[in-house]
Amino acid sequence: MSILSSPWIAITVAKSGTTSAEVDLEGPCDSVQVIIPTIDTATVALQVALEYDGSNTYYTLGNSQTTVSGTGNYATEFRLGGYRYIKIVCSAAQTTAARTFYVRGRRQ
């Protein structure tokens, strides 16, 4: 079994924001690795889309794919089930600074 990974991609949640810009993982992925920086206390989740055009509809990835609440500073992996386009969503605004997450898509 071979596992392929995309390069690490920086993805930012703006100061006072909750949602990042959309990211293209460069192909359908089975999972995505996420490095969560130190954040204001929040739950971190993913949204996924079928297309990448700046105006498309994003859907929250199922509840079982949401990380626990906390202040970050750890890495995790979400099962994607073939999605290629994602956004990071924090349940609370990041009031002290913009937060840069790193993501990398993985496929088998």
Image: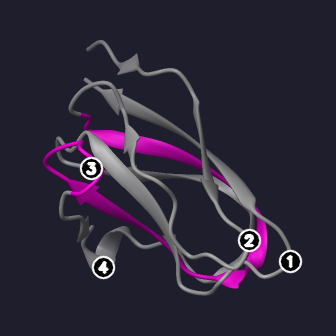
Of mark 4 and mark 3, the one earlier in the sequence is: 4
Query: Is 18 on the left or on the right of 2, as rendered?
Result: right
Q: Residues within 10 Å of mark 3 (few under 14, many from 20)?
A: many
Q: Which mark is residue 63?
A: 4
Q: Position of residue 41 (x, y in %)?
A: 72, 85
Res 15 label: 2
How far is the residue under mark 4 from the one under mark 2? Answer: 25 Å
Amino acid type, label 4: Asn
Q: How many marks?
A: 4
Mark 4, Cα crowd under 10 Å, few <14 / some 14-19 / many 20+, is few
Upstream in the sequence, badge 3 or badge 1?
A: 3
Query: Does residue 81 sit above or below 89 in this rendering?
Result: above
Q: CA distance from mark 3 to mark 2?
A: 27 Å
Label 3 secondary element: loop
Residue topped by disc 1:
96
Residue contact between numbered discs 2 and 1, judged by CB atoms under 8 Å: yes
Which residue has dot 3 on it?
80
From the image, give the main secondary structure of the stretch colored magenta: strand
Task: Give the mark nearest the N terminus, 3 or 2.
Answer: 2
Q: Earlier in the sequence, mark 2 or mark 1?
A: 2
Is the N terminus in the top left, top right, bottom left or bottom right quadrant? top left
Q: Nearer the viewer, mark 3 or mark 1?
A: 1
Q: Earlier in the sequence, mark 4 or mark 2?
A: 2
Of 20 and 61, nearer the camera is 20
